[in-house]
């Protein structure tokens, strides 16, 4: 690993008050994301990946509900982002990674073992069919999963009352945000904040959308697999 990348990881660790051991875990995640041919990501250059993969994931630590969350689930986890870096940063939390594709699940399992991340569980299956997760989580994470009304429908059944969804988004779109707010009302959720974030130099228009669960989600949710995308609550 080059001196520049090691320095950047140390900068992130200093910012987030992480230990040397946690730094080594983040380094291992980065190495596997950039060097393992099984890694399901198009960002392979370590100089880019340290920001796109690690720094962007760790932005959620600015949110108190994430820092204090003891039960966290990353839905549509893909390569394990943001879940794996956050699990390293929050060793007292239980972090579940839910992903429907077997090869991605296998990759995340291998990273958690190689980086010795003991507070991670990988669930391989569709989130809509995962009945064991209903009502079990304080925090749901979603990064590059689907349109926001779809993400809200996936997340709401998993959350405890008072829990929150943190959804990574790019440039704000007022029309899409109105649809999301309308969908949230049907699901027992309320928009809490939309925070612009700048995880690394040169990034533009990154936002964390935070929705809080303020009422019980109706029993008809989750709908059967695929329905949230095929027939969105708000078209």
Image (cartoon, rainbow, N blue to C red):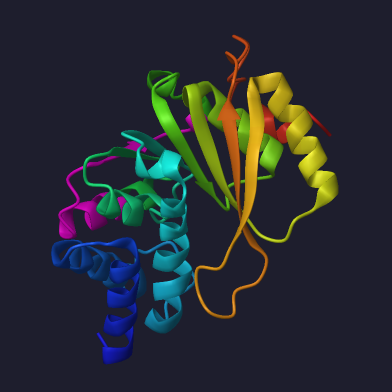
Residue 54 appears anywhere in the view: yes
Percent position (x, y) of residue 235? 84, 34
Q: Residue at x 25, y 71 (%)?
A: 27
Percent position (x, y) of residue 171? 72, 61
Percent position (x, y) of residue 32? 28, 68
Placement of 34 over or under 67, stated as above or below: below
Q: Residue at x 62, y 33 (%)?
A: 152
| Side of 118 relative to 44 (left or right) | left
Q: Residue at x 72, y 23 (%)?
A: 185
Placement of 10 over or under 169, stated as above or below: below
Percent position (x, y) of residue 113? 17, 53
Residue 36 appears anywhere in the view: no
Range of the magenta residues? 107-127
In the foreground, 14 or 161: 14
**Which residue is at the far top?**
219
| Side of 41 relative to 219 (left or right) | left
In which quadrant will I find the N terminus?
A: bottom left
Q: Residue at x 50, y 74 (%)?
A: 200
The quarter holding residue 178 reads top right
């Amino acid at each position: 690993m080059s001196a520049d990348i090691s320095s950047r990881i140390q900068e992130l660790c200093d910012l987030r008050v992480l230990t040397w051991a946690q730094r080594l875990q983040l380094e291992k995640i980065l190495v596997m994301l950039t060097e393992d041919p099984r890694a399901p990501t198009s960002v392979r250059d370590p100089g880019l990946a340290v920001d796109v993969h690690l720094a962007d994931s760790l932005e959620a630590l600015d949110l108190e509900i994430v820092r204090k969350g003891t039960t966290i689930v990353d839905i549509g986890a893909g390569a394990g982002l943001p879940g794996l870096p956050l699990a390293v940063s929050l060793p007292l939390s239980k972090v579940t990674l839910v992903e429907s594709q077997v090869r991605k699940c296998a990759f995340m399992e291998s990273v958690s073992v190689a980086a010795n991340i003991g507070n991670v569980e990988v669930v391989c299956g569709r989130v809509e069919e995962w009945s064991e997760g209903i009502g079990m989580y304080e925090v749901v994470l979603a990064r590059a999963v689907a349109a926001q009304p779809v993400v809200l429908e996936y997340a709401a059944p998993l959350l405890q009352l008072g829990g929150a969804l943190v959804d990574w988004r790019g440039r704000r779109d007022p029309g899409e945000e109105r649809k999301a707010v309308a969908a949230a009302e049907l699901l027992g959720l309320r928009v809490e904040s939309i925070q612009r974030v700048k995880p690394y130099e040169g990034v533009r228009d990154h936002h964390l959308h935070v929705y809080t669960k303020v009422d019980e989600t109706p029993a008809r949710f989750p709908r059967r697999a695929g329905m949230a995308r095929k027939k969105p609550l708000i078209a």
